[in-house]
Image (tube, rainbow, N blue to C red):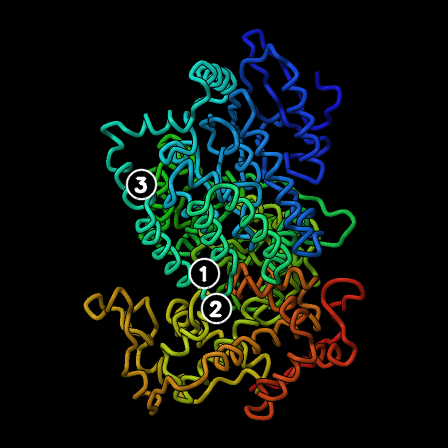
Amino acid sequence: MSDELKTFSIEKREDGVAVVRMDVPGEPVNTLNVSFADEFERLFALLERDGTLEAVVFTSGKPDNFLAGADINMLSEANTVAEAAELSRRGQVALNKLAGFRLPVVAAIHGPCLGGGLEVALACSARIASDWRKTKLGLPEVQLGLLPGAGGTQRLPRLVGVQAALDLLLTGKQLDGRRAKKIGLVEEVVPQPVLIEVAAAHAKRLAKEGKKPLASRLRDLFTADHLQEVAMEIGLERNPLGRQLVFGQAHKAVTGKTKGNYPAPEKILEVVRIGLAEGLEAGLEAEAQAFGELVVSPVAEQLMGIYFATQELKKDKGTDAEYAEVRPISKVGMLGAGLMGSGIAYVTSSLAKTAVRLKDRDHEGVARGLKAVHDQLSKRVKRRRMSELEAKQIFARVSGGTTWAGFQSCEVVIEAVFEDLELKRKMVREVEEIGGDEVIFASNTSSIPITDIAQASKHKETVIGMHYFSPVEKMPLLEIIVTKDTAPWVTATCVELGKKQGKTVVVVNDGPGFYTTRILAPYMNEAAFLVSEGVAIDHLDKALVRFGWPVGPITLMDEVGIDVGEKVGKIMHKAFGERLAPPAGVDILIKDGRQGRKNGRGFYVYADEAKKDGKKPVDETVYDLFGIRPSSEADPQELALRCTLTFVNEALRCFGEGILRTARDGDIGAIFGLGFPPFLGGPFRYVDSRGPAAVLADMQRYEAKFGKRFEPAPLLVEMAKSGGRFYGEGAVEPGKHPREAAASA
């Protein structure tokens, strides 16, 4: 029966149910490619010809994946709106055949069911999901600057209601089976071993009822438990005035979050509105047209570029050495049980599933670290993301103490102690005495060169930097720093550990501030200059957020700690001289005891009673310290450009000096670690999209006005002359502009 098919197989059961399994040949996961629509049509032609069938179950032939969505490479190859829109229409036609098939088709979902995969499931008569924790349903297209293009914007609101649909469509969030059932996205959630049997029984039941899934859903909704939901749905979503209110609120929320920088959410709102107001056919056509426009948009190009980069990094060992052995790690030692140390312990024990031994100066510190890990696990249990048994099993992997007991068996020891060079060197010596010749010593320092720390080691090849970002459990980046002495096996082993901890890992070469701290320093420095010039603090922060940064630079100073920033600033100033000299008066903040949020004294007021509309006000006494009168008259775009260009320029210096291995790593590090606006693609894609000459012109304009801190990177000057690019044919190579040693300030 399936002789003509390559991707699909058909198993006809004795009860008259055909089980269709999708299994894309030679691929680890199922994706929708250019041949999907044609083969899908042949599949249903075969099913149509069999008059003995009573129902169909659609599932996956992969052991742990339903359907992961469209092949992104296919989308990136579309060059025009018309080409991309046609891809959407072909997908719509295929799924319309599924939705209109004469027999009920029930999707049996085990594993990720995302994007186009969920659109396939939505076109089925019903959906049954497994209770496996990795079974996830969602439409993440918005995260790539796109919208679902095979009917998802039309079928989802009709199934679960407008509000629940918009929540999924506008965020890209993924639901497990339990939460999917709660909103009506799936009918049942069952253990995987009985998934097909339950789906077949459900399909047979629909066949007897005459395939009326919508009527069945409405009947189920009209129960005592769901009357409030039905009233909300009818009152708000099923009349024009109600829909207008829903869409008005959604539009306000969208513009507040995107600041107009991301077109996809606006398009999603529009096509959903058209479909509900003008009918399914009009909605599908609006979806196809919007899909085409978004696929070829600059924002989608940048976001898809980020996606491809992260996929490449999953396969990257972090070293160009032909043979770099990844050694097994059974236990990690953690020096320092504070915020960073406990965070690292949590991701190591829960995600990497590796034992951790915490060490701190006193029992109180150890207890706080253990409690922090326990609290993270408790949150997940409370949110039903894991069972109590799983949490107990994870917590059993974590132990702690004030001595070196338990460190003898650690293959890797990570330090997260105070930013003091001599203290870190002391840790190196003591770890090597306890752990032997091949224990890996990894420093979580954010600014001290790893080479300086390694001076205390008898085995410099085993010393490396592992720079995590706070809060560790949420921030996706791990920056690994290697010296000229670091052994390839050490790099590869730490990269693999980072991946198991759930991190996107970039490897950079050693230097003051490495990559992320170094490029953040001039950005924060410029923000301080702007405040010293009299720019109102909240006006500056709003300008950068509107530009696309997640928080403003002054808010970030308070979050990181003004005292921490001052210490890092001194290191950067010493390393790079006048170019990173701070503005006069910053030391006054330290003398005034201002450390930021952690001690409740910073640029903002943190007392609850001072907040208005949930927002913290500026501490006006800061202006008195600087001796200035604040103004909100400066052009927000100019403020954003001044700060952002110092960041971009420093990134180009790092590339020219060979701190970075690739522009890809620089873009991912800036976005995932520091929040560089994703729609701009990262500092290197930003230069490529604007053109080096345009960026250079802005830098030279600011250099003439403000001096050396805007001195263009040598690489930028060279690229402006040659028309060079960071991506594509003839891409420039890193390390062609080594830094001359800066005079100490």
x%, y% of residue 162? 38, 44
**Is residue 541 visible to the viewer in this orientation of the structure?**
yes
Kindly report the distance in space between the C-alpha atoms of the residues bearing marks 1 and 3: 54 Å
Q: Estimate how packed mark 3 is, as few (under 14), some (14 to 19) or many (20 or more) residues with alpha carbons within 10 Å.
A: some
Secondary-structure class at tag 2: loop
Residue 21 picture quarter: top right
Q: Which label number is shown at residue 417?
A: 1
**Is residue 357 visible to the viewer in this orientation of the structure?**
no
Kindly report the distance in space between the C-alpha atoms of the residues bearing marks 2 and 3: 59 Å
Q: Amino acid at mark 2?
A: Asp
* Residue under the point 43% across and 24% down: 212
Q: Is residue 28 above or below residue 337?
A: above
Q: In the picture, which quadrant includes the C terminus? A: bottom right
In this orientation, which residue lies closer to the viewer: 11 or 547? 11
Outermost residue, front side:
278
Q: Amino acid at mark 1?
A: Val
